[in-house]
Amino acid sequence: MTTIIYVPRDSAALSLGANEVADAVVREAAARNLDVQLVRNGSRGMLWLETLLEVVTDLGRIAYGPVEAKDVAGLFDAGLATGGDHALRLGKTEELPWLKKQTRLTFARVGVTDPISTEEYTEHDGCQGLKKALAMEPKEIVEAVVASGLRGRGGAGFPAGIKWRTVLGTSADQKYVACNADEGDSGTFSDRMIMEGDPYVLLEGMAIAGLAVGATEGYIYLRSEYPDARLVLTTAIERARSAGWLGSNLLGSGKAFDVHIRMGAGSYVCGEETAMLESLEGKRGIVRAKPPLPALEGLWGKPTLVNNVMTLAAVPFIVDKGGEAYAAHGTGRSLGTLPYQLAGNIKQGGLVEVPLGTTIRELLYDFGGGSASGRPIRAIQVGGPLGAYLPESKFDTPADYESLTAVGGLLGHGGIVVFDDTVDMAKMARYAFEFCAIESCGKCTPCRIGSIRGVEVVDRLVAGKNRLADEALLRDLCDTLTSASLCAMGGLTPLPVLSALDHFPGDFEKA
Amino acid sequence: MMHAIQEELGFVPHEAMQRIADALNWSRADVHGVLTYYHDFRTAPPGCHVLKLCRAESCQAMGSEQLEAHVANKHGAAMGETSADGELTVEPIYCLGNCALSPAVQLDGKVHGRVSSQRLDALLLQAKEQKTNGTGS
């Protein structure tokens, strides 16, 4: 009998030696004359347990972790093939509390299937959304997305359906779908995990988007820091074309949609949608002034639907099960689920897909298990380098769009970076300006010059020679950046700076 | 096109700029503009090994600055520089998407998570040995 063993090929797992574990599985199975089929799946999102090895038994899938290559022989000795007992045995994967407490809509297949197998994708409800979309009028698809309440998951949170409506309403000889896969925020990796763990769901989402707005070509703008995602996507696109999920004749319908990958080159601001379009056109990734909106004049001047990976990957579920099924989750105007990412100084870091509105405290402690260092969590940054730093007193805030805005923060792409009590918040404020100076595209003055002046003012403030005047100057400078920058890079850099100053003033008064 | 040249040579030489410009019907200044805008592109060859250290918040929360200091002290390459023996180039990178396993580094294109100073020493040693044996990249 063939034993099926899963070893992830997600790049987080690879960073801890998953390839070496996979090699050891093959080697040990051969040495024991065991018939083993090795499947390289995506990651279940329990990244602190990587490499998480799973074996299919009569009981279901049994998980072992964290496994290193040197453990593999011992696992086989302990009867791995039948789910034998071992110090690293975690139990049935689906019964693990971390997974059981989640609502996995977008990430339903990630970690479960072989990411590049078209057969497994179909067996696990793949392509159902595309099939339905092909039988629908474009307007119906758009209205399903409107009904779902889905909002832009890249960070801005703009209602996706409204944007789709705008692109559908344009008339042009060519329209495009541009997928923003320039996931540059520190503390975020959900785009990467879906591209590596279930690439077809993104391609299906893009194809549905193309049908909905009348676009026949799609581009994925992928950051160069993700070479593994590039490999998986490249293979997936080729196979999807062979399967008729992309190309000139989608599932035999006669309708066309195809996808191409374009690589970034290490620029954070290219995650801003207009800078991304410039970069897609092969130019310097400089922000464009809006209007015109990309929905009207985007890539090469044509109407372009720009959506984040997570937004597009949520679409197949919505079209398959209906907008209302998605909107049944979440709270207020923050509907559906969000794959939150727990990062930094966190004991159990990884990806958690739960309904919007889950509190920060639940995420940090129930899922995250507190800090990695064992010291108290002093601050978190939600929403990437442009998100606010929040102190412990704000941890009961529901992590949704409105609640976070109400406490002076933002949800962004759903990443939470944790810092323990050794963090120097004045240093983090300085870094926010430093990062802005490095990554500014240079088009607008507040961001280009203000960021450099910001580093200097923070240095002077911390030196403490003229504290009151320097603080007033810093706040004034932040006001200029907030109101006069062209895009979120300069416009939101004050958020981490001022939240650090407001919540942790003592860190600025050490001199 | 610049991606392809850098993948092949490890950098985009100055001499290539005019030819890229001609092929794209751009000015040389346009090519220079793109080449110098993006952090990834180099106009000079790097050391034998390229280490990209993540400097973003998540890795800072787990000690990436100590790692940076360690590399500068022990391996003779400060951030953005190449060691005197031409062995190692250290470059900053802003997020490898491996933030649950911080600090993260990328050595010769391969990502490593939860990297301590000791682990980094071992990785660098391994990379150098592979090179000597002719099996590395």
Image (cartoon, helix red, strand yellow):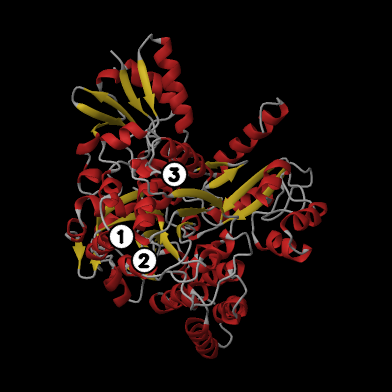
B64 versus A421 height, above or below? above
Q: Quadrant of residue A376?
A: bottom left
Q: Residue most toward the right?
A: B15
Q: Which element type, helix, strand or loop, lies under badge 2?
A: helix
Chain of the residue where label 1 is placed in the rendered structure: A
Asked if residue A366 shows in the view, the reply is no
Pick whichever of labels 2 and 3 is earlier in the sequence: 2
Question: Where does the C terminus of chain A fall, quadrant-wise?
Answer: bottom right
Pick whichever of labels 3 and 1 is earlier in the sequence: 1
Callout 3 amino acid: Gly
Depth check, front residue: A306 or A64: A306
Q: Along the horizontal axis of the image, is A156 left or right of A112? A: right
| Co-location on one chain, circles 3 and 1 | yes
Is mark 2 in CB contact (under 8 Å) with mark 1? Answer: yes
| Co-location on one chain, circles 2 and 1 | yes
- Judging by the rendered image, the residue that carries numbered circle 3 is A247
Q: Quadrant of residue A139?
A: bottom left
Distance between the alpha carbons at the discs numbered 2 and 3: 21 Å
Residue A119 location (% of width, % of height): 33, 31
Q: Along the horizontal axis of the image, is B106 left or right of A494? A: right
Q: Which mark is drawn over residue A168?
A: 2
Callout 2 amino acid: Leu
- Judging by the rendered image, the residue that carries numbered circle 1 is A138
